[in-house]
Amino acid sequence: MTESNELIGALDAAQERIEVLARQQVDGMALPKLVAAGVEEAAAMLRIMLVAEHRPYVSGADLLELWKTLVKGSPHWNTLRDNCRELVYYQNCLNAGRADALPAQPERMVIHTLRHIYLYLRSHVEQNHGDKL
């Protein structure tokens, strides 16, 4: 299996986990647990890309630290900035006891945000590694 196929496989596995979260969200998963799982899944996807791009990162780095590492020297990753910040915002609101500051239907937005990150990463790999697939 080529490196590109492995990368696509890793991202597709992340997408499968997102869909499991989506089903759990529909079944009434508690928002704090959903947000925590969403932040971790987003971080996992960024770690996949950091490894693929041979960029070292700090073990235990949070989502925004991972994004900052990914974006250095590659400004196209700024596309994901707002998605990462949105998930962290949800987490911070919940940690501060300010669920009232969340947007309408934050549960659905977590899933939509994760899907957006996945789609961007997947399309990036297809466009930049497609000749190797």
Image (tube, helix red, strand yellow):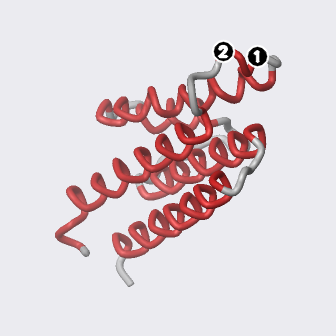
Say which residue appears at 54% left-offset and 46% top-offset.
111
Question: Is residue 93 found left or right of 116 in the rendered image?
Answer: right
Say which residue appears at 62% left-offset and 40% top-offset.
107
Say which residue appears at 36% left-offset and 75% top-offset.
5
Q: Which residue is mark 1?
A: 98
Residue 67 horizontal/vertical position (percent): 51, 35
Say which residue appears at 38% left-offset and 84% top-offset.
1
Residue type beneath disc 1: Arg
Using the rendered view, name the quadrant where residue 108 is placed. top right
Label 2 – label 1 distance at C-alpha: 6 Å
- Label 1 SS: loop
Using the rendered view, name the quadrant where residue 88 is placed. top right
Residue 3 horizontal/vertical position (percent): 38, 72
Q: Residues within 10 Å of mark 2 (few under 14, many from 20)?
A: few
87, 122: nearer the viewer: 87
Using the rendered view, name the quadrant where residue 20 is placed. bottom right
Question: Is residue 32 found left or right of 104 in the rendered image?
Answer: right
6, 18: nearer the viewer: 18
Q: Residues within 10 Å of mark 1 (few under 14, many from 20)?
A: few
Residue type beneath disc 2: Ala
Question: Is residue 122 found left or right of 41 in the rendered image?
Answer: left
Quarter occupied by the C terminus: bottom left
Question: Is residue 63 found left or right of 117 in the rendered image?
Answer: right
Tags 2 and 1 touching, CB below 8 Å? yes
Residue 101 is labelled as: 2
103, 124: nearer the viewer: 103
Residue 112 horizontal/vertical position (percent): 47, 44
- Label 2 SS: helix
Residue 62 horizontal/vertical position (percent): 67, 35
